[in-house]
Image (spheres, rainbow, N blue to C red):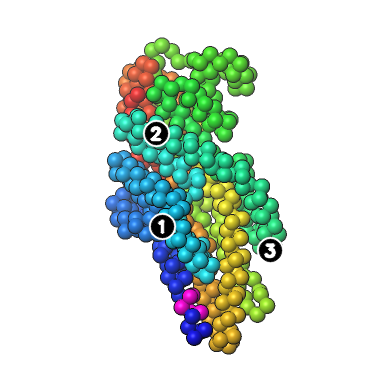
Amino acid sequence: MKFSRQWLLLWSLLIAGCATTSLFLSYPELLAPVKRALQSGQIEPAIKALSPYRDSADGVLYLLELGRVHQIGGELSASRASFKQALSRFSQIDNRATISLRRSVATGGSLLTNENAIPYDGESYERIFLHQLQSLNYLFLGELEAALVEVRRANLEQKLALERHIDEVEQATQQHQRLLQRNETFISGFKSLQERVAGVKNSFQNGYTFFTSGLIYEINGQLESAYIDYRRAQEIYPDNRYLQQIVLRLAEQLQRRDDLQRYRRQFGLSSARLGADAGELIVLYEYAFAPVRQQIKVPILGENHWHTIAFPTYSTTQQAPTTALRLRTQGGNIDITTEPIVSVAALAAKSLQERLPGMMLRQLLRLAAKKRLADQSQQLLGDMGGILANVANTLSENADLRSWLTLPSGAHIARQGVEAGRVKLELRRGSVSRWLDIEVRAGGKSVIWVIDTGQRWQIQQQQF
């Protein structure tokens, strides 16, 4: 009877874990065909591959992927719909009263399987990107008010994430260091992760999001709000000359004399005003895909059994090319290149680093639970029971490699004053180029949004 109860408990927990789609097949393996399809410009096969998983335990992650796939395909209305569903799903996830029982069962399952048994609830940087990309959907669909709502939500999400970070960072850092000291393999395995996050303050304050919100506020005539967010972006990317110019220009317009003097000294610029007959060309350039988590497996010898523990990390060899986009007009009046505004790869690595202490704590609990199971199996079934339990533990131990993989690896921006009129503009990355006909209005803004997935460029244009 004791034998039956033990294995009944085990199988019930395993079934709870199997509610997710990536328990034994890693999420990057599931997404690999989708990314290959997108790189070759095949949007429909990517959508078809993702759609069946929208209602799974990890459904919110597949909705994020679907929304981005539709964006890459230029289907902004469909992207907006998928992102709306993802936002609704996040609201349900955050309602603890609704999910507490289900999550406790899933967490229990994770103690005998792996982290993939816990339904995906999103990283802070992913939730912020969701609001930002939705704001761009609305902006390029001509729905400015809705775009403003999303940038406010993105800023609120960043504020809440910062508050959580301040409360947790000291305890998490201490716990992280204690756990790392237990095994030198951890230290060597996470060395590449440390290299990726060098210079990144946290995972959720995103220069690209601040720039996007500043741009939308500016388009709506809210210069004070635009100035605040442009300054935040410039603090994150202080060497970006386009951020320097817009911060200086708004300091002049808003008559912030102290700021103006400081920025003139800091940037080495005297003025950034546009001519009366000029408009502005603004380019948002997103390239490649977010990096894929990789797995570290470490064998640990207990009193009578070998145990395996697994952790996710990022490799420094997964660096996406960061070739800037060159912008050149036919007459040669403009010849500039884009400059970095965010490294999604760095944010993803930093987010993982911030989550590792909690992952490690659950890993220790899981190790203890699996050890008890192995000991009980050996007592009930002899050596064969212990061997079978160890095999099951090893096979079920897989790191959580889930993340939003169709996000870009990074993004660049460019801004340039242009004389009003028709402009023939070349966009060039290496040997690949596209020519666009752009209308620039005096005092207006011509915004170009480029998504570069390799062989395919998706370009959106809008005049404001």
- The location of residue 429, given as percent across then percent down, is 43, 38
CA gap, disc 1 and disc 2: 26 Å
Of mark 1 and mark 2, the one earlier in the sequence is 1
- The residue beneath circle 3 is 183
- The residue beneath circle 2 is 149
Q: Residues within 10 Å of mark 3 (few under 14, many from 20)?
A: few
Rendered view: 251 above or below 70? above
Q: Is residue 7 magenta?
A: yes
Of mark 3 and mark 1, the one earlier in the sequence is 1
Q: Which amino acid is tagged 3?
A: Asn
Q: Quadrant of residue 274?
A: top left
Q: Which residues are magenta?
A: 6-10
Which residue is painted at 52% across and 52% down in the image? Answer: 318
Q: Which mark is residue 303?
A: none
Q: Nearer the viewer, residue 107 or 304?
A: 107
Of mark 2 and mark 3, the one earlier in the sequence is 2
Q: Residues within 10 Å of mark 2 (few under 14, many from 20)?
A: some
- The residue beneath circle 1 is 58
Label 2 element class = helix
**Which one is in front in this view, the residue at disc 3 or the one at disc 1?**
1
Q: Nearer the viewer, residue 154 or 40?
A: 154
Which residue is painted at 56% across and 33% down in the image? Answer: 237
Label 3 element class = loop
- The location of residue 144, given as percent across then percent down, is 35, 29
Q: Which residue ends up furthest to the bottom in the rendered image? A: 382
Location of the C terminus (image quadrant):
top left
Most common secondary structure along the magenta stretch: helix
**Which one is in front in this view, the residue at disc 2 or the one at disc 3?**
2
